[in-house]
Amino acid sequence: MMTQMNWTATTVFVFFFLVVAVMGFLSARWQRGDLSKLDEWGLGGRRFGILVTWFLLGGDFYTAYTIIAVPAFVFGAGAIGFFALPYTILVYPFVFVVMPRLWLVSKRHNYITLADFARGRYGSRTLALAIAITGILATMPYIALQLVGMQVTITALGLHGSGLVNYVPLIVAFLVLAAFAYTSGLRAPASIAIVKDMMVYIFVLTAVIWIPLKFGGFGHIFLVAGQTLASRPAPGALILPPSQYLPFATLALGSALAAFLYPHTATGVLSSSSATTIKRNAVLLPIYTLLLGLLASLGYMAIAAGIKVTSTNDTLPALLLKVFPSWLVGFSFAAIAIGALVPAAIMAIAASNLFTRNIYREYIRPQVVPSEEAAVAKLVAILVIFGALAFVILGAQSYAIVLQLLGGIWITQTLPTIVFGLFVRWFHPKALLTGWLAGMVCGTGMAWSQSLKSAIFPIHIGGTTFAAYAAIDALIVNLAVAAVLTVLLESLGIDHGSDETVAADYVESAG
Amino acid sequence: MSESPMSSPAASSSHQAGEKSGIKPGVAASAGNWKWSLLLLLPYIGLLWLPFYAKAEPGLWGFPFFYWYQFLWVFLTMLLIEFVHRRTR
């Protein structure tokens, strides 16, 4: 897009960005706590109620990259891009059943990360290390992708020079991010999320009312989109063809199972004030899914509006530039860019919680005192943010996308330890560790065999090809290995480790 | 926070109020009511079995069936979770 610098849009953009930055710094004072403790800095003191948790998890789970990537996927590939909708529906029954148990046991034993839980439940520091490393590996590229989301909107404003000048706005934005993550911890993204989410609701609802009015209604948009998709060199379809049933279903299911095993979403869950807060949010968070579905339909509106882009990631910005007046473009882009700050901050905080708790304290300085623990976490959060920034500036964006694809496969492999562990202590910790390794190797190998371009892996069984999301295939291998080894190790009488939790830790106690 | 009538004796004998303490004795309440949670499998069946909805007709307000069916499940899932929440708490 070779547009001139758009001054009106840029002014509105900068205004909203500044307002939010100031809020981020002020939020250290909000529900004031002792920020030299890790659970105060890194979990906001486990105090967020129903509404704050709703905004926080909404801003955390439906990220800026999601806002850019979902319409882009639909624009580029048609119906299969809508897997995001079943994905973000099916995640909530899972959250409702599983996550209150995680919250309760974590509150009782002061667990801050999922790896803390694995450590306590299975008495295995190696298993905890595996969970921590998987979490950090899966999160880092995700942070880089938030920067990509932000960069896309900044470029679309017409701000571009040569070389490093290109990245000045991004660097400024991330200095701000690092500063408020350091000073305010999880309270910063929580307060920013409230403003940012309202901005996103306003721009998406405006777009889905305005654009159909301009382009002859939804019926016409779907008609044109269907014809255009079919006439492309690599045709897409408006109605999912049978060959894509299995990829669609396994992508939706696999993503839904993995979504709350990520460190940033787990952190969002643990920062809430009670198990009931989480249950109420499982009912209320699907409102964001409606928003996401509408966002996905913007991909079709971009086709109907005749948008031409060199990279599909430019779909949404290009559409908004074409149909919205400048001030509304500035407002919408600010919503997306601020939308990148919220998950990026939570991800950096969550990754640094993992490092501090499960690597630093466990392996480097076991005698660490709480204030030092929090100080280390704050420094690591800054390192994580600058690591992600360097990633994007050094032009490694395409690696970020590949790594995020792998990250989804990897994080799914922690499911047997965490999710099964929240209900039963049946698996042997050594079996879980071996299963995890098998799943990691198998899933990575499958993605590798697709040249890391796709997470859909075809399996040939008796002349029929089953193409499914590699995370699910790898999870099946993982579970099979863990189950068989558990039976084997138990029959050999090999010590299955301690368990510091009891059944009552997972349910709400009587009044 | 309305109380729903429940069959389990442990649940009906409980009169606590208030957000923090108004929960039935955990084990007894969930033992009688956990079966309601099976309703939460419905969205998985409805959305993962594509032959149910990978078609264009009948359309609604310009949306092909494939699309409005998915939107419909957002509302159905919210209602189901709320229902199960009331029955199991």
Image (cartoon, coloured by chain):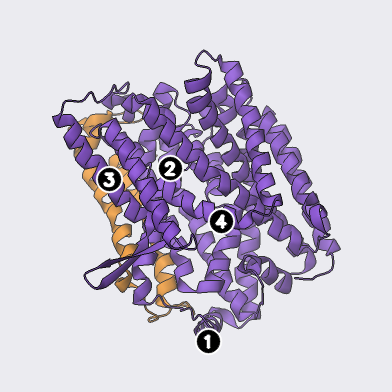
Chain colours: A purple, B orange
Which residue lies under the disc numbered 4? A401
Can you tell which quarter of the image residue A445 is in? bottom left
Instruction: Say which quadrant the N terminus of chain B sits in.
Output: top left
Query: Which of the chains bears the disc numbered 3?
Result: A
Q: Nearer the viewer, mark 3 or mark 2?
A: 3
Tell me the element at label 3: helix
For the residues labelled 3 and 1, the Cα–Cα distance comes to 43 Å
Which residue corresponds to the image point at 28% horizontal and 61% vertical from the top-left? Answer: B45
Q: Earlier in the sequence, mark 3 or mark 2?
A: 2
The amino acid sitting under disc 2 is Leu
- Going by the numbered disc 3, the residue's amino acid type is Leu
Number of numbered discs visible in the structure rendering: 4
Q: CA distance from mark 3 to mark 4?
A: 27 Å
Marks 3 and 2 in Cβ contact (< 8 Å): no
- Image quarter hosting the C terminus of chain B: top left
Q: Earlier in the sequence, mark 1 or mark 4?
A: 1
* Identity, as a three-letter code, of the amino acid under mark 1: Ser
Q: Secondary structure at mark 2?
A: helix
> Residue drawn at (60%, 34%), measured in percent from left and top?
A186
Q: Say which chain tag 4 marks.
A: A
- What's the distance in space between the residues labelled 3 and 2, CA to CA? 16 Å
Q: Which mark is residue A231?
A: 1
Using the numbered discs, state the Cα–Cα distance from disc 2 to disc 1 in whole angstroms. Answer: 40 Å
Q: Is residue A245 above or below residue A122?
A: below
Q: Callout 3: 10 Å neighbours few (<14), some, many (20+)?
A: many
Q: Amino acid at mark 4?
A: Ile
Viewer-nearest residue: A275 or A246: A246
Q: Is residue A368 left or right of residue A286?
A: right
Instruction: Find disc 2 in the rendering and name its residue.
Output: A261
Apparent side of residue A385 relative to residue A461 in the rendered image (left or right): right
